[in-house]
Amino acid sequence: MTQDDATVLYEVEGGLARLTLNRPERRNALNEELIAALKDALRRADHDEEVRAVVLQGAGADFCSGADLAALQKISTASVAENIDDARSLMELFLLIREVRIPVISAVRGRALAGGCGLALACDMVLAARSARFGFPEVKIGFVPAMVMAILRRSTSEKRAFELLTLGDDIDAEQAQIYGLVNRVLDDEAFDDEVVALVEQFGRVSSSAVRLSKQLFYEGDAMTFKDALACGVDTNVIARMTEDCRKGIERFLKKS
């Protein structure tokens, strides 16, 4: 298989790893092969010390339309054990995005639906083209957006999350930004350039500070306020001991 034939394309340039879901003829629908390839690509980027950030995007007109028809057919006939294995594989992908030490940014063109919407929201930041659409239509076929529910409830209010999950309607990028699902809405014509310009900002800040910040940010999810503060103390001390911090303080003092 050549790089162009891969279900996930992997490119690195200037400290940016670009991961492209490469099933445009299926609107980049999720299947076992794509999920496995995406996990491999994320781990590869995480182990590359030159990579400062990851951009996840879709080939063609859409970001990701959710599970493909073959996957849905398999679900309808699979055993309990097979369905558990299949669901856990997607769960592992969502967890991996948080475990990757560097920022993972989804760049959404076109539609991000069902599991594809969950994939976009699982990333640390979401950049959307103005024409992008987001939604969870699973309830229309009797399915439950169960795992993405955990992601959605952390991204928007309880009432808005419930509406999106139970009505199955999709929303545009500007509405998604109002709901807190999207960081920035970018014009379609300049989308690629503006994504690169934003992600390049990670090259101008401390990579160790960003990694420690990401780790602490998600570790705090299940903590009490007191425990989160205590964990913050530990991270604060670790950050003070890094070379980036020492050099940063030295530069700051010279300017003062």
Image (cartoon, rainbow, N blue to C red):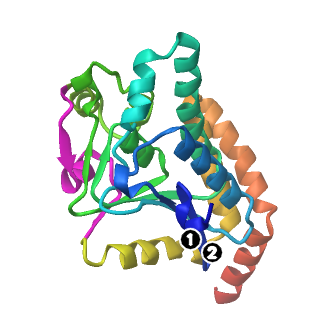
- Residue 79, compared with residue 38, is above or below; it is above
Which quadrant would residue 132 be assigned to in this image?
bottom left
Mark 1: amino acid: Phe
Which residue is depicted at the point 49% across and 71% down?
199
Local packing at callout 1 (Cα closer than 10 Å; few below 14, some 14-19, many 20+) is: some
* Secondary structure state at the residue bearing disc 2: loop
Left or right side of 8 for 113: left
Measured in 3D between alpha carbons, the distance from the residue under mark 2 to the one under mark 1, in whole angstroms, is: 9 Å
Furthest toward the top, the residue is 80
Q: Quadrant of the C terminus?
A: bottom right
Q: Nearer the viewer, residue 91 or 72?
A: 72
Furthest toward the front, the residue is 1
- Mark closer to the observer (2, 1): 2
Q: Nearer the viewer, residue 174 or 107?
A: 107
Which residue is depicted at the point 59% across and 66% down?
3
Which residue is depicted at the point 22% across and 63% down?
130
Q: Earlier along the polypeptide chain: callout 2 or callout 1?
A: 2
Q: Position of residue 64 (x, y in %)?
A: 37, 49
Check residue 202 in the rendering and tell me which mark sits there, or answer none.
Answer: 1
Q: Which residue is mark 2?
A: 15
Marks 2 and 1 close (CB-CB < 8 Å): yes
- Residue 127, compared with residue 117, is above or below; it is below
Q: Nearer the viewer, residue 80 or 112?
A: 80
Magenta highlight on residue 25: no
Left or right side of 140 for 194: right
The residue range painted magenta reads 167-186
Specify whether residue 57 is in view. yes
Local packing at callout 2 (Cα closer than 10 Å; few below 14, some 14-19, many 20+) is: some
Mark 2: amino acid: Gly
